Amino acid sequence: MLLFKKPFHEGLKSGAITLTYRRWKKPHVRAGGRYRCHPIGVLEVDAVSQVKVASIRARDAARAGFASRDALVAYLAELGPLDDDTEVYRVELHYGGDGDRVEIALDDDLGPDDVAAIGARLAKMDGDAPWTRAVLALIDARPRVAASKLAAELGRETAPFKVDVRKLKKLGLTQSFEVGYELSPRGRAYLAASAPARKRTKSRT
């Protein structure tokens, strides 16, 4: 996953931004990799290299979405002091599409009717062998864990498990990562709103 602040999103989608600099201790991406950038979709990495701050030029700053070289260097300095000899990672990239993104996945403002509608869809998917809530709960408890490991915890084969998670994704309840899944904001809101009420027992006096 590659994180960018909201002001960069439009430039990434339009192709105006094709470069970023990162102060990583080690590279978090590789050339040829595809990485999710929520909420815009997928970014594809073309090249990764380690360079000194002194090598950054005004044209690099423009490609990274900054008005000037000084603005880019100041942005990098927010994570700590740096000078011309400080090494940073230079990542060339381009927008790779929405990555099968589901717009409603970010909508976590669910009313009673929304919760009921989602519940009805899940019940239909469950059929005679309920599985949806167990999968949602497992993903909630084990975010970004490989699908093969999650499937094994449920005693299932990996391939059909992935198919089922994609069904949940189409409802906007889950999101996929390079490894594993997470509940989307909508999925977390649904799970919280539909959680069975805890049984209360009255103590006897």
Image: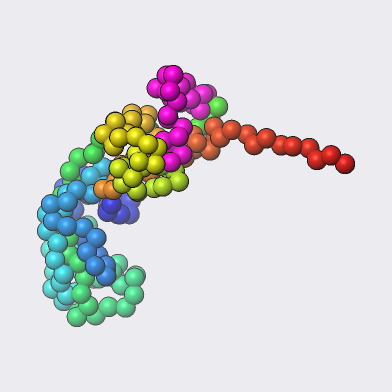
Q: Where is residue 29, by image quadrant? A: bottom left
Q: Is residue 189 magenta?
A: no
Q: Nearer the viewer, residue 108 or 61?
A: 108
| Magenta-colored segment: predominant secondary structure | helix
Q: Residue at x 23, y 44 (%)?
A: 42
Magenta-tinted stretch: 113-138
Q: Position of residue 159 (x, y in %)?
A: 26, 34
Q: Residue at x 20, y 79 (%)?
A: 84
Q: Position of residue 89 (x, y in %)?
A: 20, 67
Visible residue check, residue 73:
yes
Q: Is residue 137 magenta?
A: yes
Question: What color scheme is it?
Answer: rainbow
Q: Is 154 drawn above or below residue 130 in the view shown?
A: below
Q: Is 125 drawn above or below residue 106 in the view shown?
A: above
Q: Nearer the viewer, residue 59 or 93?
A: 93
Q: Nearer the viewer, residue 72 or 105?
A: 105
* 161 relative position to 45: left or right: right
Visible residue check, residue 67:
no
Q: Give the residue furthest to the right.
A: 205
The quarter in which the C terminus is drawn is: top right
Q: Where is residue 54, by image quadrant? A: bottom left
Q: Position of residue 6 (x, y in %)?
A: 33, 51
Q: Total label count?
A: 0
Q: Position of residue 102 (x, y in %)?
A: 32, 34
Q: Give the residue furthest to the front.
A: 155
